Image: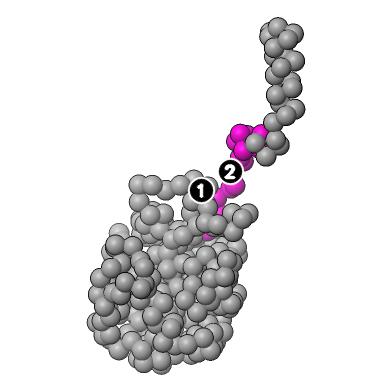
Amino acid sequence: MEDLPLFSRRLLSLALLLTPLSALAQAAPAHAAEPIRCTVLLDAETGGVVHRRGSCNQAVYPQSTFKLPLAMMGYDAGILKDEHDPRWEYQAKFNRSQRERKATDPTIWEKDSIVWYSQEITRRLGKQSFADYVSRFGYGNRDVSGGPGGTDGLTEAWLMSSLKISSDQQADFMRRFVTGKLPISPDALRRTQAIVPVFEAADGWIIHGKTGSGSMRNGSGKGDGNRPIGWFVGWAEKDGRKVVFARLLVDNKRHTDKPISYTVRDSLIADLPGLTAGR
């Protein structure tokens, strides 16, 4: 500013004094938050840690990974029957994106992450039964009260709302599921396992898992697209060996080429054979 004429310097100083502080703050580049990363793998039989790295005790919204416990509830309560029953038609009142406007059964629901199908299951369970299952499952913080912004806990608790879970808790929950330690019937366990998406990995590993994506909320309570959440949670099998896993990435930039959950899923599928080698 020293290179400007005296009069121009005075005008510039006056303009800066009159500029609202909020405008100056908006003009300044915000410091990007550090990403949150975790990968945890446990031996399904013993519970021993196969691999654990990152902020694995930090809880965030489960998003569509919650379709796994929802399937367990649905089958245990008799709302869901098998892999293709019930098949429910889409209704305009659901007000979902074009991608979800189709008839859906349990297999399509898990594979394509159909939100309205999840919400129909919880509506049919009812608030008390839904809350009881979450509590008995010991799932995350067990908070299905809903909010912020008045979101309905029965139909949205897991979607950037009150329910939160850490990667450590996700892995522990999956271990209790695959070893039959959750309070559901053996039939509900078997039928839930049958609809979880399956992927092939290197070295003979077969991976069963569910993705989840969303975003953190900013200071005003709105979803922050610059803080996307990506999950991949499930179990993997090879030659009689079984491990459970959870991988989480909360990034500090937008993901526009593909959903962040697909990035997390694909990276875990690529990494898992190496993470389990020699363990």
Q: Are marks 2 and 1 in contact (CB under 8 Å)?
A: yes
Residue 251 position (above or below residue 89): above
Cα distance in 3D space between marks 2 and 1:
9 Å
Q: Position of residue 57 (x, y in %)?
A: 60, 65
Of labels 2 and 1, earlier in sequence is 2
Quarter of the C terminus within the rendering: bottom left
Q: Is residue 30 magenta?
A: yes
Closer to the camera, 146 or 213?
Answer: 146
272 lies left or right of 219: left
Who is closer to the viewer here, 63 or 121? 121
Q: Which residues are magenta?
A: 24-38
Residue at image coords 38%, 54%: 259
Residue at the image point whose x is 26% and y is 85% from the top:
85
Amino acid found under the numbered disc labelled 2: Ala
Could you tell me if residue 269 is visible in this image?
A: yes
Say how the picture is coloured. one colour
Which residue occupies 55% across, 68% down? 161
Q: Which numbered dot is residue 183? A: none
Residue 32's label in the rendered image is 2
Q: Is residue 95 magenta?
A: no
Identified at 59% across, 47% down, the residue is 33
Asked if residue 48 lies left or right of residue 101, the reply is right
User: Residue 20, position in %: x, y?
Assistant: 70, 35
Q: Position of residue 235 (x, y in %)?
A: 40, 71
Q: What's the residue type where badge 1 is placed?
A: Asn
Can residue 133 be seen here? The reply is no
Badge 1 element: strand
Residue 96 % position (x, y): 35, 66
Residue pointed to by mark 1: 226
